[in-house]
Image (spheres, grey):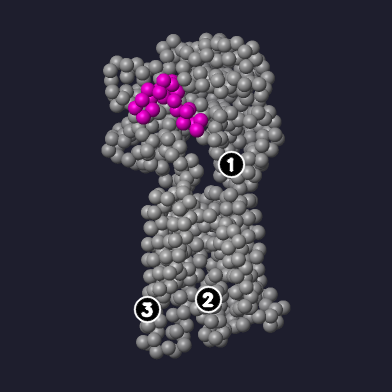
Amino acid sequence: MVLAWMGAPWLTAAVAGTVAASTSPVIVLAVSHEARARGQVTERLMLMAAFNAVIAVIGLKVLRIVLASDDGTPTEEFTRASISALRVISGSFLLGVACGFAMDRLSPLVRGTPAMPVMQIALVIIASMLAAQWTLSPLLALLVAGMTARARMKHALTVEPHLGSAGAVLNVLLFICLGLLFSLDGPATLWPWVIVIVLARVAGTAVAIGGLARLSGLSLRQAAGLTLALQPMSSLAVLLAADTFGWSSQLPGAHTPTVQALLLATTLMQVTGPIWTQLSLRHRRARPTTPDAHAAATLHRLRAADPGRRARTAARQHTGLRPRRRRPRDLLRVLKNHTGTWDVKPEITRSMIEIGTSIQRQHSVLLAELRDLRDQLSRGARKLNIGIAGGGTHAYQHWSEQKIFPGERFHYISELYGYLAKQFTVFGQHVHVGCEDGDRALWLLHSLSRYVPHFIALSASSPYVQGVDTGFDSARLNSVFAFPLSGRAPFCLTWEDFEKFFDKMTSTGVVNSMKDFYWDIRPKPEFGTIELRVCDTPLTVEKAAALACYLQCICRYLREQKPFEPSEDDYLVYTFNRFQACRFGLDGEIVDPKTKERHRLRDDILRTLARIDEHALDLQALDASNLIRDSLFVGNDAQWLRGLRGSGRPLSAVVEGATQRWMGA
């Protein structure tokens, strides 16, 4: 419309607008790969780059029909041109869909082998040859094939974006082709047209994305980043337009300034486009609005946390689902309008969910919320004939039978870690403790390292894996150990040092957010907390509340009395102590990192309970301490499960017993 207002013939303006709507998929893919960008913006960027190119191809074909109409072409020829264009569009679309389905079907057979890129290239060649043979559009067919494969395969679709010297030659050839179309007649007069094309393109993209941002779950900042990232124009669309219309030879009344300005704008935006895309993706990573945050941005939130957060806790549990008829997914729908302040959401596989409490200060209030959570969850599950159980593992499920829950991050983890993602169908309790600032959070994190075996042994409830008694009280943590970024956090006692560490890790591309670390205890800067992650999910919510408050009391004891200063040497015995707790539970032995003396875990927990009794009294958590003390003599949940099995019950009955215990039946 703007070009037409400036005096360009409407058909020339329409062709220019259609070409300008396209985005260069090659540049977007290459820059996204170099920036190691992942997330909502990147996913939409990939999709919209391909979608814009498809729209440009279809738009040019439709304009060709309109051109035939305006030329006064006889009705028979106009009809023939219309049918031909529709045949090209529909045929190319169907060929692309078939190619995408073929890639989806063949990829599992060769994934992870050198044959994978060979198969992809072969399909591209076959699709291009068929399109040429059937006088279809190879570009449209390949774009639709990529979109189809991406939609079906999600993160399982991997393509190497760098084509080495061949890719460099391709880019050079594209610029040469643009140069052949371009003339130097009056270049100074073209800049107003160039500026209009570029600004109109930016404005149109911004309005479209901004209008749909909220509907698609993007923040305004993410929408702005996506707008910038889509700016590289596609020289392929220009070449397609030149081939379709032949510019001035076939385009009646072609406006030379508009055509030449379009070529110049395309060249300009293709040269500078990678800069805008890279800045957009880096800006999105450095200043995200989601909880997955870059250290430099979100860790400041922890510094600014309310001092009153100290000694506040929140518990999150992963629980196992036992669907008898209905899908576990239905449970999330039933619980969508629950009345509690807690939350429930899916986890990486469809056999587990995550439930979390609100922030709490007192044991009684936390316990009441957990019981309300349990009761509402159990009522919803019974309606669907689903059983819900605690325990760190399902006693006889096999990882190979698990299915990944549909979600961007879940598919990313599945693609990255392979079978480990499905094997990660294990159930743990995470407890968050609020901290005033980053330095205090790190001090507390490393001070708690001595007590990690306590929580492993007390919560242990995963003796069985795939129908076998592992000999471990907590076999769940063996699944966590397999991940490369598990274990202990680096020994940093200042937030400044931790930020430097995090920046180094992100610069390597190994991590994108704090979620990529599977440490036993990790900072959660977006919450202003540290997160203890070693507990199995207890068989009862009463035990879950007691564990959270035991941690709360220890943290208060450490903060107020400072019985020792954490040091790197504390970790000399860390792995050994951790193994003892996993393997033998409360009967395990641990080594004091200072005195080098050995103690039974059960005895060490008893001594700790004595030290924190006054803090438990102040925090109104004596009932929690008493439950922990009683469990030292009764035994942990792993012993309870083995007791059922030892009485002659099959594993199915053991799981049923755990289900009844958690649901309160």
SS of the residue at dot 2?
Answer: helix
Front of the two marks 1 and 3: 1
Q: Answer with the quarter of the image where residue 193 lies.
A: bottom right
Q: Secondary structure at mark 1?
A: loop
Task: Work out whether mark 2 precedes mark 1 in sequence or the reverse, and give the earlier one.
Answer: 2
Q: Are marks 3 and 2 in contact (CB under 8 Å)?
A: no
Residue position marked by numbered label 1 in the rendering = 511
Q: Nearer the viewer, residue 208 or 257?
A: 257
Instruction: Locate residue 440, reporting x and y percent.
Output: 66, 27
**In the image shown, does 478 or 201 lie closer to the viewer?**
478
Which residue is located at x 60 percent, y 45 percent?
A: 509
The residue that appears at 39% across and 89% down in the rendered structure is 74
What range of the chain is rendered magenta? 460-482
Residue 83 marker: 3
- Residue 635, label in figure: none
Q: Nearer the viewer, residue 81 or 302?
A: 81
The percent position of residue 535, horizontal first and vertical second, equals 48, 25
Q: CA distance from mark 3 to mark 2?
A: 19 Å
CA gap, disc 2 and disc 1: 42 Å
